[in-house]
Image: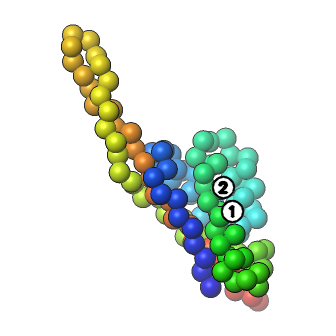
Amino acid sequence: MEYQAHLRHARMAPRKLGLVADLVRGKNVGSALAILKYTKRAAAKPIEKLVKSAIANATDKSKGAVDIDTLFVKEIRVDQGPSSRRFMPRAMGRATKVTKKTSHVHVVLAEAKKK
């Protein structure tokens, strides 16, 4: 069974979130949370929160029947969200465009096959 969670309109560039998402892709949930806890990037905090949310969705959806230790990050995807555009004043009456990017992050957890 697969369990998922989504983070939409995260106020961070997809490049930055993608670097942290690559660290936990394919890992089991316990080691993924440990990696995210000690990663010194700002993007680690929202992804850690999202993985915890997916774990909570798994326990709620299965009514507590799922073993959390068997879950692993099957898929984690970072997509670009809508960008808001602002203008910054520059010299001699000019202005330059500043693009504030957002991201959508999708996490899918699955149960590892029993041996």
Where does the N terminus fall, quadrant-wise? bottom right
Residue 104: x %, y % from top left: 46, 57
Question: As drawn, which residue projects farthest toward the left?
Answer: 93
Q: Nearer the viewer, residue 43 or 63?
A: 63
Q: Which label was assigned to residue 52?
A: 1
The residue at 65%/64% (across/down) is 53
Question: As drawn, which residue projects farthest toward the bottom?
Answer: 115
The residue at 39%/54% (across/down) is 80
- Disc 2: CA contacts within 10 A as few (<14), some (14-19) or many (>=20): many
Q: Is residue 78 left or right of residue 38?
A: left
Q: Quadrant of residue 62?
A: bottom right
In this picture the colour scheme is rainbow
User: Residue at label 2?
Assistant: 48
- Mark 2–mark 1 CB contact (< 8 Å): yes
Image: 76 above or below 41: below
Q: Quadrant of residue 76?
A: bottom right
The residue at 68%/52% (across/down) is 36
Residue 41: x %, y % from top left: 62, 42
Rounded to the nearest angstrom, the CA distance separating label 2 from label 1 is 6 Å
Q: Secondary structure at mark 1?
A: helix
Question: As drawn, which residue projects farthest toward the top?
Answer: 92
Image: 102 above or below 71: above
Q: Tell me the amino acid under the disc marked 1.
A: Lys
Q: Tell me the amino acid under the disc marked 2.
A: Glu
Q: Secondary structure at mark 2?
A: helix
Where does the C terminus fall, quadrant-wise? bottom right
Image: 102 above or below 91: below
Residue 69: x %, y % from top left: 78, 74
Q: Quadrant of residue 99?
A: top left
The residue at 21%/10% (across/down) is 92
Residue 43: x %, y % from top left: 58, 46
